[in-house]
Amino acid sequence: MAKYQRIKDLRTNNNFTQAQIAEYLHVKQSTYSQYETGSRDISVNAIDKLSDFYNVSIEYILGRTNNPELNK
């Protein structure tokens, strides 16, 4: 799996464009594209925001678990 494949999968499975997610994160679309390809590291803050946005765990986004559920 690519470094940040899950953020691409979450985006496409939820029918969002890169531009829409980039706007949510307050970054350029090209920056977000680099996150998805792994050519640029994504900040902890952005991972946290995406976790909240998609209602999945940070561990799921990072590929540390296959269970997307949040542990509350």
Image (cartoon, helix red, strand yellow):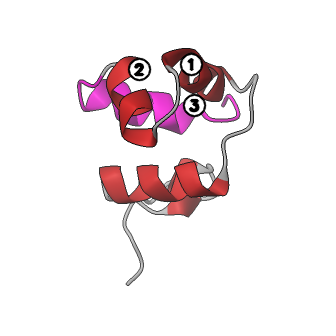
Which corner quadrant holds the C terminus? bottom left
Q: Position of residue 63 (x, y in %)?
A: 61, 49
Specify whether 57 is left or right of 23: right
Q: Is residue 60 above or below residue 11?
A: below
Q: In this view, does 53 lie above or below 36?
A: below
The boundaries of the magenta stretch are 1-16
Q: Where is residue 59 in the image (x, y as percent from the top left)?
A: 57, 61
Which dot marks residue 33? 1
Mark 2 vs mark 3, foreground winner is 2
Asked whether the residues under the numbered discs 2 and 3 touch, taking CB atoms below 8 Å apart as contact, a structural biologist would say no
Residue with the mark numbered 2: 18
Query: Which residue is at 33% across, 19% downward?
Result: 17
Q: Determine if the magenta segment contains residue 68.
A: no
Which dot marks residue 47? none
Residue with the mark numbered 3: 5
N-terminal-most mark, 2 or 3: 3
Asked whether the residues under the numbered discs 1 and 2 touch, taking CB atoms below 8 Å apart as contact, a structural biologist would say yes
Query: Which residue is at 71% across, 27% downward?
Result: 38
Q: What element carries label 3?
A: helix
> How busy is the neighbourhood of tag 1: few (under 14 within 10 Å), some, or many (20 plus)?
some
Q: Is mark 1 on a helix, strand or loop?
A: helix
Q: Where is residue 4 in the image (x, y as percent from the top left)?
A: 62, 35
Q: Which residue lies furthest to the top in this view?
A: 30
Q: Which residue lies furthest to the bottom in this view?
A: 72
